[in-house]
Image (tube, grey):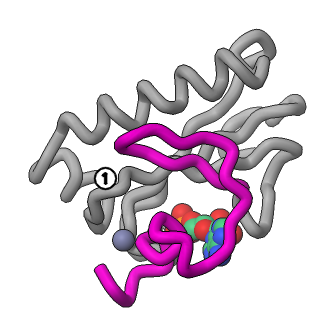
Amino acid sequence: MSDCLFCKIIDSKIPSTKVYEDGNVIGFKDLHPQALVHVLFVHKRHTRDINEISKNDPVQLTDLFHAIRLFTEKSGAEEHGFRVVTNMGKNAGQTVFHTHLHVLAGESLGHFGA
Ligand code: AMP
Ligand code: ZN
């Protein structure tokens, strides 16, 4: 989608710090990190949110979690643990409407929601 921020990052029209890429997915550092490691995983095919991706092409979810597994194995995050978060819609505070999974790692994350 031409006016989508993350599609522009995928197309390298906007700079990002990529830490993972395969044929389907990229992972790049969040501009405003909420943990020592904060990476956003996005599918190269645009969908709006987690429910649209599930409805339109659920295989993309497998692609995303495959990428997260490879990244966390390689970076060492798997050993110490990590958190995966996605925001869907207004009440969750979604600000970018290209489905993305936040991966938080690199330190103790505390209790969820604390
Ligand atoms: P959400 O609020 O769940 O929609 O997440 C959007 C995330 O995108 C936020 O954590 C922002 O910090 C992050 N973000 C916004 N613009 C950029 C950008 N140009 N590069 C990297 N991360 C960004
Ligand atoms: Zn997009």
Q: Give me the residue at 76% from left, 10% from top.
A: 79
Q: Which amino acid does label 1 sit on?
A: Ile
- Decide if residue 21 is on the left or right side of residue 103: left
Residue 54 image point, x, y percent: 19, 45
User: Quarter of the picture for ligand 1?
Assistant: bottom right
Q: Quick check: is 15 in the magenta stretch? A: yes
Residue at position x 55%, y 71% from top? 12
Count of numbered badges drawn on the protein: 1
Please tell me whether residue 30 belongs to the stretch shown in magenta.
Answer: no
* Between 2 and 31, the one nearer to me in the picture: 2
> x, y percentage for residue 20?
61, 40
Q: Quadrant of residue 88?
A: bottom left
- Image quadrant occupied by the N terminus: bottom left
In the image shown, does 30 or 90 lie closer to the viewer? Answer: 30
Q: Is residue 15 above or below residue 46?
A: below
Mark 1 C-beta closer than 8 Å to ligand 1: no
* CA neighbours of label 1 inside 10 A, class few (<14), some (14 to 19), many (20+): some
The residue carrying mark 1 is 50
Q: Which residue lies furthest to the left in this view?
A: 56
On the question of residue 23 being in view, the answer is yes
- Across and down, in percent, residue 41 comes to 52, 48
Residue in the foreground of this view, choosing between 51 and 77: 77
Side of 51 relative to 55 (left or right): right
Instruction: Look at the numbered disc 1 and give the secondary structure of its residue.
Output: helix
Magenta segment: 1-29
Query: Would residue 91 be found to the left or right of residue 19 on screen?
Result: left
Q: Outermost residue, top direction? A: 79
Q: Residue at x 29, y 64 (%)?
A: 46
Q: In which quarter of the image is the C terminus?
A: top right
